[in-house]
Amino acid sequence: MKKLSEWTCKHRILILIVSLLLLIPTILGIKATKINYDILVYLPDDIETMKGQEILTNDFHMGAFSIALIDHMETKDLVSLENQIRKIDGVEKVIGTSDMIGTTIPKEMLPDSIQNKIEKDGFSPILITFKDSISDEKTIEAIETLRETTSKACHYSGMSSVVKDTGDIANSEIAVYVIVAVIFCGIVLLFALDSYVVPVLLLCSIGFSILYNMGTNVMFGEISYITKAISAVLQLGVTMDFSIFLYHAYQRQKRQHTDKLKAMEEAIVETMRSVVGSSLTTIAGFLALCTMTLTLGSDIGLVMAKGVLLGVVSVITIFPALLLVFDKWIEKTKHRELFPKFDKLRKFNIKHYQLIAILFVILLVPAYYGQMNTKVYYNLNKAMPASLPSSKANELLKDKFDIVSPELILVFKDMDAHRLNQMLSEIESVKGIDFALSLSKINEIGLPEEALPNELLSMLKSDKYQMVIVNSTYETATPELNHQIKEMNQIVKKYDKKAILAGEGPLMKDLVEISDQDFKNVNTASIGIIFILMVFVLKSISLPIILVATIEFAIFLNMSVPYYTGVTIPFIASIVIGTIQLGATVDYAILMTTKYREARRSGQDKIKSADYALKHSMTSIMVSGLCFFAATCGVGMYSKLEMIGSLCTLISRGAIISMIVVITVLPALLIIFDKVIEKTTWDKKLGKKVIK
């Protein structure tokens, strides 16, 4: 540690030059990192629905599809439009009404039940299939080309359209997220620190580590848009307190050493000793997300763990170099600290610690009940603004043709028409099923296979499989649809044990089931990992229990707010928020506990020790909590993407709640369980001089 600190101080100019030069490969890495906007790709590859997607792509060349709604267009113009769409790169097949019934049969001659499926209120549907997957670049480019080259009378539904709109919004908002976070954090730092220059240097230092983190994401090939959107502001909020600690340590050492280099060397060593334990728990918290079956957890966890590590490296290299180089400017722009001391609050907490403990016990029950009963939604379309082209198209499709959740059944090619129609009759009798379409059904209405165009034939039949298109009137990711899919699966397996039910609905059903299990697993993993780490860091059995219980109480409070305010949150927020809040804010509790133990070692009684702990940690905890809040609250307020906005709202509120709980509840618990702590802690220095 000492050698590293000496090297950092000696080569401060070199460090800054190298830091700037590293921005070149960093920017190249950022540009080379692909962004994925489709959450469904994070489902495990070995589940049946994902195998179904693979069959659709490989056997039917149907990686994705969209039902386009064409508003008031003559038949000849429709045929011309279909031919225009076929020429677009990425489009595989285009199936319109003319492909089903030809152009010579008047629509008026068809039964009403069929007429209503091919035209209603002037709208005509066209099925477009794409060669590549839902979120593949070629598919998204095809959607973009479709929107640009066809008239405004064309509306394109489907998951690929949703992915396209998600990407457009996310890319337009990310720069704003960072700017808002920097401004809000800057305001907090101006109040918390004693120089106008230091907040700028601190934010620059963290900015370097954020950029390095974004650039090194190229090692993963691609990251999710959620990770990209929240990683910068999360890293800013989480690593801010490391930098503040170094600056305060530097100021203390400067009062003891006339040589600023010597002062910085000591400050770096002091910071490294304090930050290692804190950063390890934070990194462990993020890595716990890797236990999720939904690999989006690994995506967020690995990027954020790497970000914290790079943040620590930046704090002990780049930030000291900046402080030393701009030391004169720091001194010239000094001002008194504007952040209040909160002495009255500190004294109130100590005086009424028993009342606070009672309130903790009372609030624990409704907080736990609330967080267990908070409603979540899985429908990805619900997270999108209604004004988007994809949202409008999906709503039109539902309104005009009652097409809400099309599913695809893949059965083996050798199933005879009679048996297949029997299966379809059973499926159509299931509540909420609007229709089921197959080659055998088309043949039943008097259209033989020989009369059908190759595009339609190849879409419904491959060398190995037959495809059945089923339309459900239920919304995706709802209990009604999930029950319906279960019923359909039972029917399908009765006729063909190897048949697969694919499409958005079944994929979302798997997402619901996997996410529910992930919620339990990831919380258990994060608590277990952080508990074990704290046992070694604090050298105690009881302290980790007390600290984890304190932060878990804060998490319960945070997660219960949506329940008591009647707000439904996106599923991913409910899974990751507990781990993020625990990993990011347990540092507050560790700092408070460390100060408490310092006082106990020096011989002070438990009341005075709690007062000492509050006096010497409360400001740091409040500044850190407010910075974390500032870094994420702006995103929660600004983002048009519900998935991002809800997650950042929960994170920002969680930072404030954790801050308040650590300042109020933790000192009370430390006082009450002081004897237990003494007996279950193997720190030799603790207890030798304590006053009973």
Image (spheres, rainbow, N blue to C red):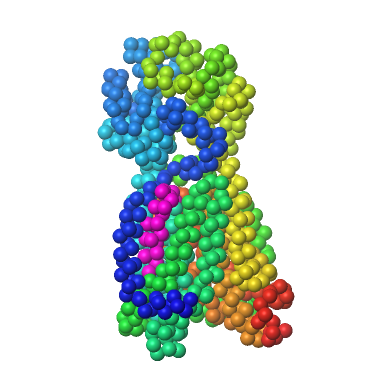
Tell me which residue sits at (53%, 14%) in the image: 417
221 magenta-colored? yes
Instruction: Place residue 685 in its image quadrant.
Output: bottom right
Q: Which residues are magenta?
A: 205-226
Residue situated furthest front in the rendering: 3
Q: Going 44% across and 75% down the picture, which residue do you hit?
A: 4
Q: Nearer the viewer, residue 310 or 642?
A: 310
**Where does residue 256 sit, x and y in percent of width and height?**
45, 89
Quadrant location of residue 666? bottom right
Residue drawn at x 66%, y 74% is: 670
Task: Please state the horizontal and vertical placement of residue 265, each as a whole percent of the image.
Answer: 43, 81
Can residue 170 be found in the magenta stretch? no
Residue nearest the viewer, comparing 251 with 642 = 251
Q: Would you say the magenta stretch is mainly helix, strand or loop? A: helix
Q: Position of residue 307 (x, y in %)?
A: 45, 61
Residue at (38% x, 78% y) in the render: 9
